[in-house]
Image (cartoon, rainbow, N blue to C red):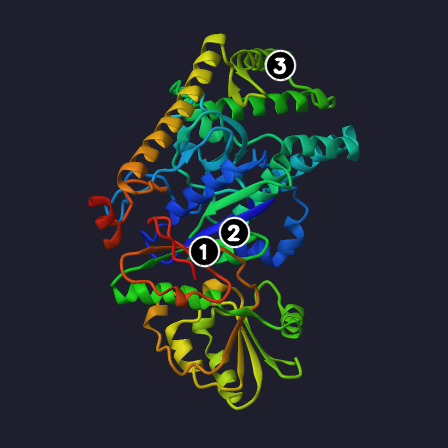
Amino acid sequence: MKTYSFIGSDKNAGKTTAFNYIYRQLYQCRQAKPLCLSSIGINGEDVDNWEGVKKPHIDLLADSYFITHAVHLASHPGKYETLLTLGRPLFSKNYIFGRSLLEMQVILEGPNRGKEIKSAKHQIEPLLGDDAIFLIDGSIDRQFLAKPEISDGFYFSLLFTKQSQQFQKSCDFLKMMSLTPCCKKTHKTISKNLNADTKSLVLAGSGQVLYRGETIVSQDRELIKECEAIYNVPCVLYLKGALTSSLYKFLAPFEQLQLVLDNFTLFLGTTASKRQRPGFKPEISLYHPVPVKNVFIKQETHFDPLLMPPGLTAKNIFREIHNEG
Amino acid sequence: MKVEILRQHRNALHDELDYDLYLSLFRKNQPLLCSVILRPMDEDAAINHYAELAEMEDKLSPAEREKNLEQSAALPAIDHLFNPLKKEQLEQYHLFELGNFLYNTKALCELERSFPLDIKGGESLDKMLHILEQYTEKSFSNLRETEQTKQTRIALAENEKSLEKAVKRYEKQILEHTGLNMIYPWPRELALSGEQVEKSSS
């Protein structure tokens, strides 16, 4: 089973629209491949509770699989079949894995913790089969989505408006997509020295572990001290914590440093747009690379296709003319 | 199953027992027992408790015990279902959960030879299962369809298809008349470039 997650640069970046678009595309050419939909947050409501604007619906077509909170099925008796209940003690809420018998407009609210999603995948995969596709309407603040055991690929929705912060955020996403995976040798050394509690590693050029941090990166004073000590030495810094603006600023002059982020979500903290961009000297790479499936844009201002990383094209599903990179 | 030690005894018991090793002795994959809090017993209760355990162990072979535990793990937690059941407000998925619970309880009762349940209880179980089987199908997954509901469902699916075809025809007409291609999602989120607006209004 392949799992694809949808991530948006901002609220109203068109993530749910892209989710619906891909779902319908896959549905039309699915050739008996089972499709399953779920969401990290609550999705498919009429109105956004935060901003009070209308939101796109999620229309499940007949013979589609879904995972949602049981309460959202109350108005759909007879339109679906229940295949599995995902409840306590493994899940915090009572989720239903079902199959639609008819078209139904449903609110999707699936498990939103890494352990829960892993367990859900483990339970539904034998029922759906190897060739199934599982689509998760995700969120950038859920780092676990970036783990290879959770997501096999990502669809990104980027919002380009005249507001500089939103614009910059979307540009940060594009920059993130152009990050390369760290080299095999570094990957092997990191993987050998990782355990479940590791939040940071400082590795010498020889691969020797100079420091292992197990506290949250942004609060790890020892890590800062260790970094200061290796200012002019070629080293690898592995981080499993957000690259905050203060950390970004601190690391900016480290010419000899190779910075390896565990996954792409760490590059996109909420403060990303406030970073001072020029002059960041360490080379940044990723421990878990980003398998990009597609990039959707919603443009309310001019968008330069040259902003796209090499090999990727942007698709605008809101306009007739698509911006091809 | 979540196992924890009663708060006020946590430190004492933690010191006395190798906490992780001790808890590793428990089979925790029992949804029916969502949460268990361990607390100290007084001496009399402990003597009785261990006597009961010894008696159970005498009657059950390890293989039988293993089978029973496995079957117990298949019993879903249904405590969230009691309130709607009391209010006579069961949802379709509740029937699935209840059906699975009863089905697996029956299998557990059939396995259980050493401590059999009373016959009266067994009769109620069969009655409830019979009612559920009467009104649901596919192992409690669906509400049982009558010929009439089946025909209605088919008609609804046909209507959906006809509507989709009609919408596509309508989109094609709009394209021919205005040059606007009604791409998905339309029309609420369709934003037009200046060039397109000119094209559509010319």
Q: Relative to B52, does residue A291 appear above or below in the rendering?
A: below
Residue B107 image point, x, y percent? 67, 22
Residue A257 image point, x, y percent? 53, 83
Q: Nearer the viewer, residue A103 or B10?
A: A103
Give amino acid for label 1.
Arg
Contact, mark 3 vs mark 2 (Cβ under 8 Å)? no
Assess disc 3: are there few (<14), some (14-19) or many (≥20) residues with their C-alpha within 10 Å of its C-alpha: some
- How far apart marks 2 and 1 lie (CA) works out to 8 Å
At a point 38% along the width and 81% down the height, the residue shown is: A278
At a point 37% along the width and 69% down the height, the residue shown is: A272
Q: Which residue is mark 3?
A: B122
- Residue A114 bears which disc, if any? 2
What is the quadrant of the C terminus of chain A in the image?
bottom left
Is residue A95 rendered to the left or right of residue A196?
left
Q: Under tag 3, what secondary structure? A: helix
Q: Relative to A224, does residue A179 appear above or below in the rendering?
A: above
Q: Which residue is mark 1?
A: A142
The image quadrant that residue B54 belongs to is top right
Contact, mark 2 vs mark 1 (Cβ under 8 Å)? yes
Q: Indicate the chain on which mark 2 is placed.
A: A
At a point 51% along the width and 29% down the height, the residue shown is: A63
- How far apart marks 3 and 2 lie (CA) works out to 41 Å
